Image (tube, coloured by chain):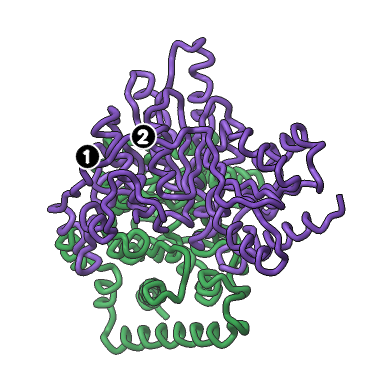
Chain colours: A green, B purple
Amino acid sequence: MDRTETFYRKLSLIRRFETHLLEQFSWGKLSGTTHTCIGQEANAVGLTAHMTGDDVVFSNHRCHGHYLALTDDVAGLLAELMGREQGVCHGWGGSQHLHRDGFYSNGIQGGIVANAVGAALAEKTKNSGAVTTVFLGDGTLGEGIVYEAMNLAALWALPVLFVIEHNGYAQSTPTAMQLAGEVAARPRAFGIETHCLASNDTDAVYAAATPLFDGLRSDGKPRCFVSFTYRLGPHSKGDDTRDPAEIEAKRADDPVLSYRRKLPEDVATRIDAANQQRLVEIVARLEQSAPAGSQHP
Amino acid sequence: MATMAQAVRMALHYGETHLGVTDVFGEDVGPPLGGVFTATQGLKTAWNSPLDERGIIGTAIGLALAGQRPVAEIQFGDYIFNTIDLLKLAGNTCWSSMGQYNLPMVVTTIVGAGIHGSIYHSHSFESMAAHIPGWKIVLPSRPIDAYGLMISALKDNNPTLYMYPKALIRVKGKDLIPGEPADERELKKMIDAPPGPTLYDIIDVRSRWEPRWPEGLTDYQVPIGKARIHREGADISVITYARHVFMAEKAAEILKAENGIDVEIIDLRTLYPWDRETVFNSVRKTGRCLVLNEDTPVCNFGEHIFRTIVDECFYELTAKPRVLAGADVPGVGLHPAYEEASIPQVNDIVRELRGICGEAP
């Protein structure tokens, strides 16, 4: 399968997965909370494509895309969200607390950024050559520990890639109401090489990240990637307070639909159908394996 | 009757119109959302901060030092942990300035399990909070107490940590708050922002919406430091607060029906300074007690109450008192079964009450 097909398979899978989740919540079949990445899939796919087996990822509350793009573990993630034994962490933590093979997520804003510094220090000490990527949002830039972590990563020359997925909103609050100055100026103030990209095209993300990963793997110093993107879905579920016209305008730049056009229609249709079939089978398997009474995992 | 969210909102409105409150702020506190649980919807003085808990508490301290009466919200109690150095500072400011600088600030946060929110939407904070001297700490279980304690907190010159239980935030009260319209549908029409016809219409509808506040709201106060007897009984006292007041009530009904045991329930309402007199009087009357809450068990706030009861009422006890708290686990799991296993349930309370009453004196 060529790269375009691989990328589209992942994009389409993430989108289907996230859409399925929101439906399940609206039908009352899932409980608790979740944060989908609908509209931000390009970063997940384009960046994880650079990662190798030893690399480490720290993600946040909006972590499903990152996790699926990296691990392809649909069944484990869905079961986790259902609080089931078959889940990534046996259903204890749910959506925001995934731990598996060097992938860690936590919903507390900012805290994970410093965790990534520690993980990168460990990899550097081991001389493993691994890159530690930490995903944060523009909202997280309100937290002071982000800058403490950037300082440490730069000071100790650690191979950390800070990825700022700038979707314009901190929960319901627009960025203009919560951030002063330029986003890219913040990592640069610590001497961290920073690249900005305003594109929802996975190929563009992949290309922009190539020199960053090359640099990280050669000199081991931290880098920052600022991606201007947009969240097409709600922050969590049922809590969208943005102007509907604004969201509608952004749909023209839907990363999944746009990327689909790069493929011949029959190929794209085949990939969509395969993803759909896979998701349906996993959902059915999980439903069948629900324990008697179904209130217990 | 008003829900707790509506009660808090009305009290804050009274505060911004009568008590000099000029800033109610925090993450998603201002329009259009008006708080994740809508407790700050429609307030004139509510505004959104960045996602910056230390900035929020730090700013509140500065405003209070300047003589204002800020209300700062931490969106979930689970997010307050990274502010603990500033909470310590707020607690000691009056003392370290030899009483020259008060901090008339209120920090609100929602605590406890009950919404299947998993690890970061289910934590309790009261035991941690009680370790930070200098704060008054309240945790109401009923909307009317939520209103009255908020008014007291807004008037108090000390920092007050105002917690409220997630599990009860949308539960309607049984008592009319002074000034609240008798028809709850009318109240809803007056002060609840309308949802849009679809999910994405909310901003359009709300940008044109303004609340109509009930005109007769008063400065009805529930004094900080005063517990209430939720249910009178002769045989055993349950010392509790928040959601477990109502869980204890269910357990009490079972014990009455099945064992003829008459349970008294004390709703502390204030955790610091807590109402020793009401607790001791109850325990002296019944001779037995269960201290009940959902926080983790090691250095649990209830252990302090337990120890004080043993110190003060030892010779009047007819059975060994017990503490029933949450499980000794680092988080509350996602699945309802995990949550139920982590938090004392009605059956657990019944079992403990029967156990205490079954002990020979």
Q: Circle 2 marks a residue in which chain?
A: B
- In this rendering, would B232 be left or right of B103? right
- Where is residue A177? Give x, y as percent: 25, 41
Q: Nearest the camera: A87 or B61?
A: B61
In the image shown, does A104 or B59 lie closer to the viewer?
B59
Residue tagged by mark 1?
B44
Q: Earlier in the sequence, mark 2 or mark 1?
A: 1
Residue depicted at 59% across the width and 62% down the height: B250
Q: How packed is label 1: few (under 14 Cα within 10 Å), some, or many (20 or more)?
A: some
The three-letter amino acid code for the residue at tag 1 is Lys
Q: Which mark is residue B71?
A: 2
- Give me the chain letter of mark 1: B
Q: Position of residue A7 (x, y in %)?
A: 38, 72
| Amino acid type assigned to the residue bearing label 2 in the image | Val
Q: Quadrant of residue A185?
A: top left
Q: Is residue B60 left or right of residue B225?
A: left
